[in-house]
Image (tube, helix red, strand yellow):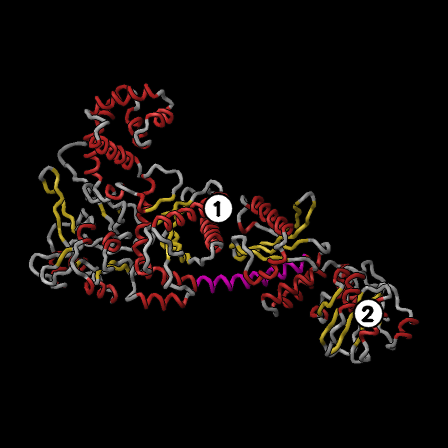
């Protein structure tokens, strides 16, 4: 039996497994008891039930079994050991047999850790090892030493093994999110753990709280923290570690404190594990950037007619997992007024995530490409009878994306341009140019929504091609008298005329907009007719004045 | 296009015509006089502006136009049937019908020379250095302007053309 010499601290099972050579030990079951204090190390001298029953195994001891000494009926001996009040059971050997599920369940219920180490060690001076741990803890150097051993341990694991192992060690569920708060795809299995309604609410609340707290912090000042959220009147503690490299945020690691309370070692584990996860995210981002660059070049060629034939396009598209034999459509998005509290790259990443999520939920896989200062979104569409149905579907989709974006990023809006639908993929470039035109000219239309279809541009499309001087000459010819009258008499007849045409000549709607009585409006319109020497009942005069008003509005905007 | 330097020598026009073996009066690049009240106060050398949103590319039913990654808008005459849609769509009158080939033709910024790291012929031939090829992707000096008075609208097509405005003439005998 090995007993640590007198120290002011008593190590627990988790401390015991923090240093070499035991840091590589595998946890079989009962890890909720990781904080069980180890008061002694016990190595049985004989292995039979009678002997184990009679022998005094000290309370709260860690029983170590070197398996080359143990007979083959281990699964009969272990239940006997479990009846004692132990800190844990440690199996060391080259071949560790699988334990029966009844034994595992029993150990989990009793919170008794059973750990194994695949090693050919035949004996260990446990007392010296325990003494070392106690001394390090007394000197407050234990955590620093442990950091290195944990970090090296995690480096040897693959992405999914790493998360599994980290979860096991911490004994609490862990999720990794990317910068746009989406679970990373090698974590999706774990994301299913959070598919239950309560778990979803908890994670949602954590994300909202984190965003609200961090909105005013610069990225290099983000640090990990321990916090709690309340869901359905219950408090849930969690640990969040931001994954940052050279002031760039790559994502977050969230660990929920649902099973066992976080100890200092758990926090070290999370931070060291987070470093390795960060490396994975950085590598994934580099690969994604290279892929995006080449995919971006393909999309540029597709949208600017840099191809020989449709067959060539289809074969190139296959390389990117695109089936270009299906009809596709396109949206062009541009960020409008932005709140300075958001970085532009965060907004673009957020927008891409929203677009991907929205379109994927409709059963299509979108391709998103950044072209100059716009985002081009290409996605397959269902071929419907009648272009107006396709137009309606696309407009609804655009409204959905815009709504989600504005909800996510308040005080920031996105303008969306939609081109005409073309059946052939070779005409997608035309749709792209039309969408850009719609985006460019949307500010001259009287719309609040900033979603513009090329087909809805109307006469603005023609006017945009005429030189400024010609336009100015035209509108001055019709409106100079009115503008001068307004300046001289401090009236707003020009505005009245603008709104009259905006409301399609409806007296009641126009009067309501101007906060006037309809009769007052009628009088004003009569006056306008006198000043401009026109008749608002004549179609030709209506057209001329309406176009002049549109040009005046275009001229007033940059 | 540096309007303060152009002397209207038509050197760029003839260099282009010569290099591309253009017949008769057919030109890709034209030098225009800038007039105010019938007085010529400057010259403007104009060819295809290789717009960011080329209307010719959008309207061509045969997809004869394409835009390279360096921004040059190229016309491939192989499928061109001279429908004239691009001719009427372009606000700058860049694509025109070649009277010999009966197909549309326009400036392609001497892509062969660009690929060899050389300047287009018009730029090399300009004796006053009024023409220059610049990179629009980075930040630009404030001396460059997107348009000049009486120039066709640039809002829609966004031509890849920038002007250096002519200097205000100095009057040495009158105090201002």
Q: Chain of mark 1?
A: A
Q: Residues within 10 Å of mark 2 (few under 14, many from 20)?
A: some
Secondary structure of residue under mark 1: helix
Residue A365 x, y percent position in the rendering: 45, 59
Residue located 62% across and 55% down the image = A194
Q: Which residue is mark 2?
A: A127
* Residue A24 location, quadrant: bottom right
Residues under numbered marks 2 and 1 in contact, where contact means CB atoms less than 8 Å apart: no
Give the x, y percent position of residue A507: 32, 25
Can residue A239 be spotted in the picture?
yes
Residue projecting furthest to the right: A54
Read off the magenta span.
A267-290
Report the residue marked by disc 1: A404
Name the one closer to the observer, A298 or A118: A298
Residue A533 in picture, x, y percent from top left: 19, 24
Identify whether B134 is placed above or below A467.
Answer: below
Whether residue B139 is visible, yes or no, is no
Q: In front here: A503 or A181?
A: A503
Identify which residue is drawn at 61% across, 47% down.
A205
**Residue found farthest to the front:** A385
Q: Let me know if residue A273 is in the magenta part.
A: yes
Q: Main secondary structure of the magenta part?
A: helix
């Amino acid at each position: 039996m090995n007993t640590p010499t007198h120290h002011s601290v008593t190590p627990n099972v988790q401390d015991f497994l923090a240093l070499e050579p035991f840091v590589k030990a595998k946890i079989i079951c009962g890890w909720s008891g990781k904080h069980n204090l180890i008061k002694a190390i016990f190595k049985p001298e004989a292995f039979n039930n009678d002997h184990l029953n009679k022998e005094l195994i000290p309370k709260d001891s860690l029983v170590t079994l070197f398996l080359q000494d143990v007979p083959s009926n281990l699964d009969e001996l272990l239940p006997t050991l479990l009846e004692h009040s132990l800190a844990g059971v440690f199996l060391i050997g080259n071949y560790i047999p699988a334990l029966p599920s009844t034994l595992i369940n029993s150990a989990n219920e009793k919170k008794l850790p059973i750990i194994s180490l695949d090693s050919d060690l035949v004996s260990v001076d446990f007392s010296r090892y325990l003494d070392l741990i106690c001394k390090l803890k007394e000197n407050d150097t234990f955590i620093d030493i442990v950091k290195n051993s944990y970090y090296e341990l995690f480096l040897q694991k693959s992405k999914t093994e790493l998360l599994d192992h980290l979860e096991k060690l911490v004994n609490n569920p862990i999720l990794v999110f990317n910068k746009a708060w989406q679970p990373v795809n090698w974590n999706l299995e774990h994301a299913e753990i959070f598919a239950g309604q309560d778990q979803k609410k908890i994670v949602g609340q954590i994300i909202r709280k984190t965003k609200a707290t961090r909105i005013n912090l610069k990225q290099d000042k983000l640090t990990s923290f321990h916090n709690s959220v309340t869901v359905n009147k219950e408090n849930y503690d969690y640990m969040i570690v931001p994954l940052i490299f050279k002031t760039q945020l790559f994502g977050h690691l969230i660990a929920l404190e649902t099973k066992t309370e976080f100890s200092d070692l758990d926090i070290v584990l999370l931070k060291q594990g987070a470093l390795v996860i960060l490396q994975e995210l950085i590598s994934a981002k580099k690969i994604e950037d290279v892929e995006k660059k080449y995919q971006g070049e393909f999309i540029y060629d597709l949208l600017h007619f840099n191809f020989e034939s449709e067959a060539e396009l289809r074969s190139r598209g296959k390389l990117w997992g695109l089936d270009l034999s299906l009809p596709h459509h396109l949206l062009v998005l541009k960020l409008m007024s932005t709140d300075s509290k958001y970085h532009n790259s965060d907004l673009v990443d957020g927008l891409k995530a929203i677009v991907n999520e929205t379109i994927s939920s409709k059963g299509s896989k979108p391709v998103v490409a950044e072209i100059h200062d716009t985002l081009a979104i290409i996605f397959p569409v269902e071929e419907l009878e009648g272009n107006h149905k396709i137009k309606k579907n696309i407009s609804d989709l655009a409204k959905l994306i815009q709504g989600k974006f504005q909800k996510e990023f308040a005080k920031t809006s996105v303008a969306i341009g939609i081109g005409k639908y073309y059946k052939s993929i070779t005409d997608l470039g035309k749709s792209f140019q039309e969408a850009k035109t719609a985006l460019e000219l949307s500010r001259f239309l009287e719309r609040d929504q900033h979603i513009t279809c090329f087909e809805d541009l109307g006469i603005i499309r023609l006017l945009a091609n005429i030189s400024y001087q010609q336009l100015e000459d035209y509108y001055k010819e019709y409106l100079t008298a009115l503008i001068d009258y307004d300046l001289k008499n401090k009236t707003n007849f020009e505005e009245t005329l603008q709104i009259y045409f905006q409301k399609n000549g409806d007296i009641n709607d126009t009067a309501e907009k101007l906060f006037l009585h309809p009769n007052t409006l009628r009088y004003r319109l009569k006056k306008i007719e006198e000043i401009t020497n026109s008749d608002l009942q004549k179609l030709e005069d209506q057209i001329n004045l309406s176009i002049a008003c549109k040009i005046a509005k275009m001229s007033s905007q940059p | 296009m540096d309007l303060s330097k152009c002397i209207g020598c038509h050197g760029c026009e003839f260099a282009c015509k010569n290099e591309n073996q253009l017949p008769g009066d057919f030109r890709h690049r034209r030098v225009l006089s800038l007039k105010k009240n019938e007085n010529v106060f400057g010259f403007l050398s104009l060819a295809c502006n290789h717009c960011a949103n080329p209307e010719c590319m959008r309207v061509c039913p045969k997809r004869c136009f394409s835009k390279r990654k360096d921004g040059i808008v190229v016309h491939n005459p192989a499928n061109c049937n001279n429908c004239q849609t691009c001719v009427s769509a372009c606000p700058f009158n860049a694509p025109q019908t070649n009277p010999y080939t009966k197909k549309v033709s326009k400036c392609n910024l001497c892509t062969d020379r660009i690929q060899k790291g050389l300047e287009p012929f018009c730029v090399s031939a300009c004796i006053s250095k009024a023409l220059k090829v610049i990179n629009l992707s980075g930040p630009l000096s404030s001396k460059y302007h997107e348009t000049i008075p009486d120039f066709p609208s640039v809002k829609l097509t966004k031509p890849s053309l920038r002007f250096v405005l002519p200097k205000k003439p100095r009057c040495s005998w009158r105090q201002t």
